[in-house]
Amino acid sequence: MKNQFTIAAFAVLFVPFGSHAQSARTAILVAETAFAAQAAQAGTTAAFLANAAPTALIAEKGRLASAQDVGQARPARPGSRFIWYPVLADVAQSGDLGYTTGPWTTLQNERPQAAGEYVTVWRKQPDGQWKFVVDMGVERRRVRPASRQPVSCCRLTGNLPPLNC
């Protein structure tokens, strides 16, 4: 009987936290997906301005800058599209901070110009909406496909060994 009470107490204490975190994770994924859809419909700049928290930062030319300032100063680029989607998301146990990450691609007249990976940090705002507080990405350059031949022997010393060890 004592063991059953202990199990029931743990279930009551911990199950709500898991579902709270899961619902916040779902909310972040919905916010990210809506953000990307808004960029496709209204344009990237409008979407970034609408989804950025007032003090949000974005990576611009290797430095963090105000998302609002950069967005308002960015000129329109006819025929340009920026597309992305989340492949991973998680949320803090508090349920008010989380991140999404995934691939991005820029297109000019529907032709790929650049591609990379992004990470966006989201914070739940006082009005309950999720807005991004940090958005940054890295561009993939001269990416070679992964080798199909496994590396069979590598010794890890003070320096990393060459891949053909």
Image: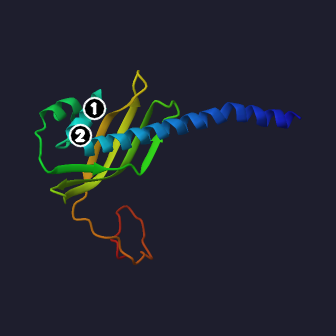
Give the distance between the C-alpha atoms of the residues marked 1 and 2, in whole angstroms: 10 Å
Mark 2 residue type: Ala
**Residue at numbered disc 2:** 42
Residue 129 placement, left or right of 118: right
Q: On residue 50, which mark appears? A: 1
Horizontal and vertical percent position of residue 14: 66, 34
Q: Residues within 10 Å of mark 2 (few under 14, many from 20)?
A: few
Name the secondary structure under disc 1: helix
Q: Nearer the viewer, residue 146 or 107?
A: 107
| Crowd around label 1: few <14 · some 14–19 · many ≥20 (10 Å) | some
- Give the quarter of the figure containing the N terminus: top right
Image depth: mark 1 or mark 2 in front: 2
For mark 2, give the secondary structure. helix
Horizontal and vertical percent for residue 51? 30, 33
The residue drawn where x is 22% and y is 60% is 141
Q: Residue furthest right?
A: 1
Asked whether, in this view, residue 1 is left or right of residue 120, the answer is right
Q: Residue at x 50, y 31 (%)?
A: 95
- Image colouring: rainbow
Question: From the viewer's perspective, is residue 54 above or below residue 64?
Answer: above
- Locate the C terminus by quadrant: bottom left
- Which residue sits at x=38%, y=49%? 86
* Mark toward the start of the polypeptide (1 vs 2): 2
Q: Amino acid at mark 1?
A: Ala
Residue 75 x, y percent position in the rendering: 10, 39
| Quadrant in the rendering for residue 52 | top left
Q: Residue at x 16, y 50 (%)?
A: 80
